[in-house]
Image (spheres, rainbow, N blue to C red):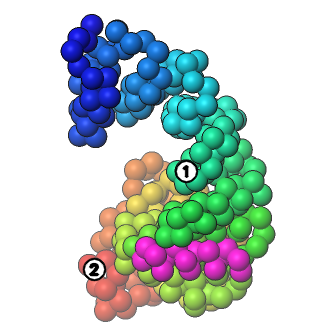
Amino acid sequence: MVQGVDSEDWAGYGQSLGGTTAYEQAIARYDELLASQPDLYEIWAYRGLALEHLGHLRDACANFEQALKVNPEFALAWHGQGVALARLHEYATALQCFQQATKLAPTDANAWYNRGNAQIHLRQFEAALSSFGRVVELVPHDYKAWYHRGKVLFLLGHPYAALASLDKTVAIKPSCFYAWNLRGTILKKLDRLEEAIASFDCSLQMNPNNPDAWYHKARCYSLQAKTTEALEYLYRAVKLKPLFYAAIAKVDPDLRALDPDQAFQTLIAAATATHLAPPSPATHVRTLKSSGFLSEKSLFATFNE
């Protein structure tokens, strides 16, 4: 039992501990306070947040529920409950919580953002578009909200509007490599291949170990019948994620120009057979050279950057 301590000061101390990631200590402080004042709904919610940070998601939910028993209109508890449930992949129930949170706190951009994410998982794309639209109204420089807005617009079949949203994303956050990726994917779909390649290049400048960009860049070159470049970039993608990209490359219609090339067949077979990685760069180089695909100069540039 806590005696001679102001409850607000005690709660603030617990929050400060949580802010330094000392979540176990914060929970201990909250427990002492709740032992004497069990109806402090804010403390139940803060305790739930600490548990959520520690990954104890079911226990966190129980704490948020306790807070809501005392005060059903406490938006923070609804929001925290939604986050914990979303992390448990219970998106429908999480969405109900986020809806309550945004109803009670309509200017909470984080709640709207999480509401939109839950709606994406539930394939409620029109609703998600509205949620992310609300986020960028509240926080115009939230690059992640602009990104998700662009993704949803693309899924809804509005590529030009999606590009405009993604342009906002990269203007705010040029290092957002996955926004450059999606932007390139949309440009490729619009047959604007050179612009798509430029977008993938921007993505790779930000994150060279980004297999999606290497793979989609290979697709663009394959569609231009530039098999040498396509093979180089496909190799980079498969090297980073062998089984996944080997599997899709075998059936991707955009890569069918590579089918006659022995280097392509060798790369896919090796990646699939080993379940680990394709041949080493030196082995791959020998295959390409024997097929007449690359000069010594281009080989050096490709595998020694």
Q: What residue is rendered at 44% in x and 81% in y?
A: 202
Looking at the picture, how far across and down is residue 291, in whole percent? 47, 82
Which of 181 and 218 lies nearest the eye of the viewer? 181
Which of 119 and 133 lies nearest the eye of the viewer? 133
Residues at marks 1 and 2 touching, judged by CB atoms closer than 8 Å: no
Q: What residue is rendered at 63% in x and 45% in y?
A: 102
Is 38 a magenta residue? Answer: no
Specify the amino acid type for callout 1: Asp
Which of 44 and 260 lies nearest the eye of the viewer? 44
How crowded pointer 1 is (Cα within 10 Å; few <14, some 14-19, many 20+) is rated as some
Q: What residue is rendered at 47% in x and 23% in y?
A: 41
Magenta segment range? 160-174
Instruction: Tell me, yes or no, if residue 148 can be seen here.
Output: no
Specify the amino acid type for callout 2: Glu
Q: Main secondary structure of the magenta part?
A: helix
Q: Residue 247 is drawn in which quadrant?
A: bottom right
Is 173 a magenta residue? Answer: yes
Q: What residue is rendered at 62% in x and 74% in y?
A: 165
Dot 2 falls on a residue whose secondary structure is loop
Q: Which mark is residue 108?
A: 1
Residue behind mark 2: 305
Q: Is residue 294 above or below residue 169?
A: below
Q: Which mark is residue 62?
A: none
As measured in the structure, the alpha-carbon distance from the residue carrying label 1 to the one carrying label 2 is 45 Å
How crowded pointer 2 is (Cα within 10 Å; few <14, some 14-19, many 20+) is rated as few
| Left or right position of 95 against 60 | right
Looking at the picture, how far across and down is residue 195, in whole percent? 57, 89
